[in-house]
């Protein structure tokens, strides 16, 4: 495993990290073993944005015996209220959630205290100015409960402002070709031909500037969504009409200025192995540029679910991310596989229970029309 300096934090983090958002979908001991297996492969950084007790308990068990060997991103503003994830800037709710995080992770500090999920200009203005929320973050830093201040966002405009502000030392940002490459014409081949050796050609100019500013300001970047929720592994689902491998996606992210670690989501040890294989892969296996240059024309970037879970809470308690994942897998087949149908039917709340309030859509970073997808999923699995 190779390690990179995470900007001005000076932490040496593994190039391949652990994004923990799927831990709760597995048995507790299975997930503990998965984290320990990843650690045995050299992975030393993980993200815990999840507020649910099960995920936090799993991480606590997994890292307890080697706490100093892990760097943990813990989020301030991700809370668990009435049994569901709720993003908030209420200082008291943040305090309750953060104290719960420390207790369940069996630690007295978090390495990277993340200002959680800031995508809007007004939200950035709120969290970056003096007030109860920022005062609490700075209090945690002053007493050593967090060692460094970070921020998570999907918006390059916010990421650039944060990097320039002097407030944060690192940023958790969504990085993959589908999010980065947003050309203004349909002639996608004009943007890919033999350009990657020279850097960022073809990437949306706002993102180009954001990456440069982070590098200039020594604000390290850890990457979320490197596989776009797994969509980039399938030609049928990729916006490019071509499939990429985990190694190619990881290499894409690690070539961006300021990027230190790519936090991948894992369900099995085999998936950990597929990501860690990057470390010994030949250049020919890392080459994403050729694959994209030969891909069909760019079709669509926005509006696709990456199963991140930020759509929560749902008043009908639907697991929106899982419904969307099962729906996307099902529509790739000529008919719905029995195993997928059974998995869907085992969900506590189905898509047919959607009340169409569209509150989830206002929280989605990627513009997914969730209510419409719930209606299609209900019809498909009926």
Image (spheres, grey):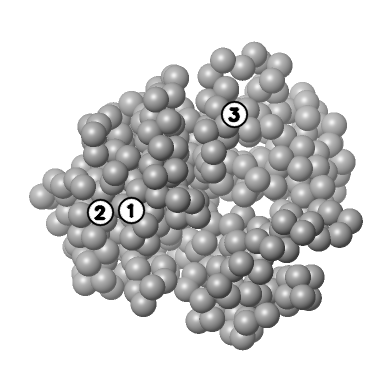
**On screen, residue 288 above or below 227:** above
- One can see residue 165 in this view: no
**On screen, residue 119 above or below 59:** below
Q: Earlier in the sequence, mark 1 or mark 2?
A: 1
Left or right, 341 with respect to 271, comes to right
Label 1: how many Cα within 10 Å (few below 14, some 14–19, many 20+): many
Residue 88 lies in quadrant: bottom left
Badge 2 element: helix
Q: Earlier in the sequence, mark 3 or mark 2?
A: 2
C-beta proximity under 8 Å, tags 1 and 2? yes
Badge 3 element: helix
| Observer-nearest of 219 and 284 | 284
| Residue that numbered label 1 is attached to | 56
Q: Earlier in the sequence, mark 1 or mark 3?
A: 1
Distance, label 1 to label 3, CA atoms, is 25 Å
| Observer-nearest of 365 and 102 | 102
| Residue that numbered label 2 is attached to | 104
- One can see residue 377 in this view: yes
| Residue that numbered label 3 is attached to | 274
């Amino acid at each position: 495993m190779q390690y990179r300096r995470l900007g001005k934090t000076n932490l040496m983090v593994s190039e391949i990290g652990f994004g923990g958002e799927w831990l709760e979908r597995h048995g507790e001991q299975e997930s503990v073993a998965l984290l320990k297996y990843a650690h045995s492969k050299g992975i030393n950084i993980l993200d815990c944005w999840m507020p649910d007790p099960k995920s936090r308990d799993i991480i606590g068990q997994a890292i307890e015996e080697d706490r100093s060997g892990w760097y943990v991103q813990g989020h301030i503003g991700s809370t668990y209220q009435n049994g569901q994830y709720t993003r908030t800037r209420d200082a008291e709710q943040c305090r309750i959630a953060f104290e719960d995080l420390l207790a369940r992770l069996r630690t007295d500090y978090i390495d990277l205290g993340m200002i959680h999920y800031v995508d809007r200009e007004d939200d950035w203005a709120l969290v970056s100015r003096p007030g109860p929320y920022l005062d609490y973050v700075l209090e945690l830093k002053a007493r050593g409960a967090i060692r460094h201040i970070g921020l998570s966002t999907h918006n390059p405009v916010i990421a650039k402002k944060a990097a320039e502000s002097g407030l944060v030392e690192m940023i958790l940002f969504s990085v993959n070709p589908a999010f980065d490459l947003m050309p203004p014409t349909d002639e996608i081949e004009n943007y890919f031909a033999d350009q990657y050796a020279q850097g960022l050609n073809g990437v949306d100019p706002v993102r180009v500037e954001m990456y440069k500013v982070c590098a200039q300001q020594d604000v390290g970047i850890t990457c979320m969504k490197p596989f776009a929720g797994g969509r980039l592994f399938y030609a049928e689902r990729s916006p490019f009409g071509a499939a990429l491998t985990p190694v190619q996606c990881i290499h894409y992210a690690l070539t961006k200025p300021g990027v230190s670690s790519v936090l991948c989501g894992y369900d099995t040890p085999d998936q950990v192995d597929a990501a860690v294989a990057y470390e010994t892969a030949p250049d020919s296996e890392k080459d994403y540029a050729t694959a994209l240059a030969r891909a069909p024309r760019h079709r669509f970037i926005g509006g696709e679910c990456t199963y991140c879970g930020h759509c929560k809470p749902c008043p009908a308690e639907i697991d929106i991310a899982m419904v969307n994942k099962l729906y996307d897998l099902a529509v790739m087949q000529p008919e719905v596989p029995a195993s997928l149908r059974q998995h869907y039917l085992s969900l506590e709340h189905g898509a047919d229970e959607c009340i169409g309030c569209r509150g989830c859509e206002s929280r989605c970073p990627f513009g997914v029309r969730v209510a419409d997808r719930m209606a299609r999923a209900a019809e498909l699995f009926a």
